Structure formats: C-alpha cells, structure tokens
C-alpha cells in the first residue's frame, strides 16, 4: 500500500515533477466512483493531474521531494554517475522512458550525465545527438532541475550555475 498524502502537501509525481496535492476527491468515471488525488504542478499551475488513490501503478510514481542533504549528495554523485548508454535505439528509448516514469533522482542523474557525454562525443565528430535523445535529456533536466530548484528555493534558471559552483568548490570542473 502506498503512503497517503494530504491536501497541501508538496510531492514529486513522475514526469509532472513538483506538485501540490490540491484536493482528494471522489469522481465518477465510467459508472464507478473512485477517489483521486488532484495534483497541481508547481511550475505549470494551469494543469491538473488526477491520480486514482487505489491505483498502485500510478501512486507508486508519487514520492516526497528530496531533502537539502539529498540534493547535496546527488550533486556530489554527478561527476561519477554511471554511464548508462545503450547502443540499440529501441532498447535505449524503452529504458530512458522507464527512467523518466520512475523519476528516481539518481537514475535521472545517470541519464543526464550519459546523454551530455554522448552529445559532447557527437559534437567532437561534428555530429548531433539523436533528436529523441535530446528530448530525453531536456525532459530529465527539467524534472530534476525543477525539484532541485524547489528544494533549494532557487529560481529555475539558477540550478545549473548552482551545481557548477558546488562542483567547483569540491574540486570538480564539470559534470
């Protein structure tokens, strides 16, 4: 059974990122009454996401936000993040889609690091990263960046420079 969330609580939901539990309501769909979390994405306040409270597959994608200490540990991990490149395009798309859905900060970090490295390799060959990989990179960076921004109270545009600064303080030039 998944954790119960309360109205007003800030959570992380899959690809929607940082959300506030706006309501817990019962709705009738297809003749059945179901209880739903009504989530409002913090960085897209015009949207609402409805998650049935009894759907384990969907509620398993809800988690609490990282703590400041967890963000610090994640940043320290970035330079040594595992390379998770998969040569087969279809398998890579499947794996990266799963990583976005499960929304675990460490796995997102590995995907971001891998795709940034791959993009740099391609740049040196005067090539570009595959468009699907660029989209995965952008989505992962947005999801993780928004959470770090929220946890640390930074503007969204300040996250990259904050990470770079933290890494420089620890003697790392680039992640």
Image (cartoon, grey):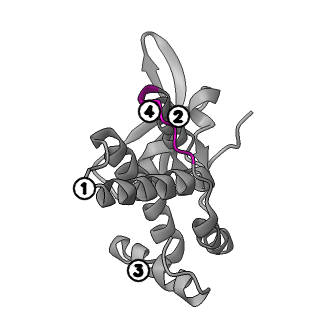
Element under disc 4: helix
Label annotation for residue 21: none
- CA gap between label 3 and label 4 equals 29 Å
Residue at figure coordinates x 53%, y 23% from the top left:
34
Label 2 environment density (alpha carbons within 10 Å; few <14, some 14–19, many ≥20): some
Front tag of 2 and 1: 1
Numbered range of the magenta stretch: 84-90
**Mark closer to the chain start, 3 or 1:** 1
Q: Residue at x 37, y 76 (%)?
A: 155
Q: Is residue 1 magenta?
A: no
Q: Earlier in the sequence, mark 2 or mark 3?
A: 2
Determine which residue is flagged by label 4: 93
Q: Quadrant of the N terminus?
A: top right
Element type at marker 3?
helix
Residue that lies at the very extreme toward the right in this rendered image: 1
Q: Which residue is mark 3?
A: 161
Residue that lies at the very extreme toward the bottom in this rendered image? 169
SS category of the residue bearing label 1: loop
Tell me the CA gap for discs 3 and 1.
27 Å
Badge 1 is on which residue? 126
């Amino acid at each position: 059974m998944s954790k119960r969330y309360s109205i007003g609580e800030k959570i992380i939901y899959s690809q929607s990122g940082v959300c506030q539990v706006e309501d817990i309501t019962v709705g009738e769909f297809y003749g059945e009454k179901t209880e739903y979390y009504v989530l409002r994405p913090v960085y897209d306040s015009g949207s609402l996401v409805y998650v049935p409270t009894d759907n384990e597959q969907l509620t398993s994608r809800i988690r609490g936000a990282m703590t400041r200490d967890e963000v610090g540990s994640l940043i320290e991990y970035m330079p040594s993040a595992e390379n998770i490149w998969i040569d087969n395009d279809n398998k890579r798309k499947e794996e990266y889609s799963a990583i976005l859905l499960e929304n675990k900060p460490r796995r997102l970090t590995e995907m971001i690091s891998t795709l940034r490295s791959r993009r740099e390799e391609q740049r040196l060959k005067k090539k570009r990263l595959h468009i699907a990989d660029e989209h995965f990179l952008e989505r992962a960076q947005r999801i993780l960046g928004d959470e770090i921004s929220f946890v640390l109270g930074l503007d969204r545009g300040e996250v990259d420079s904050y990470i770079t600064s933290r890494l420089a303080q620890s003697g790392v030039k680039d992640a």
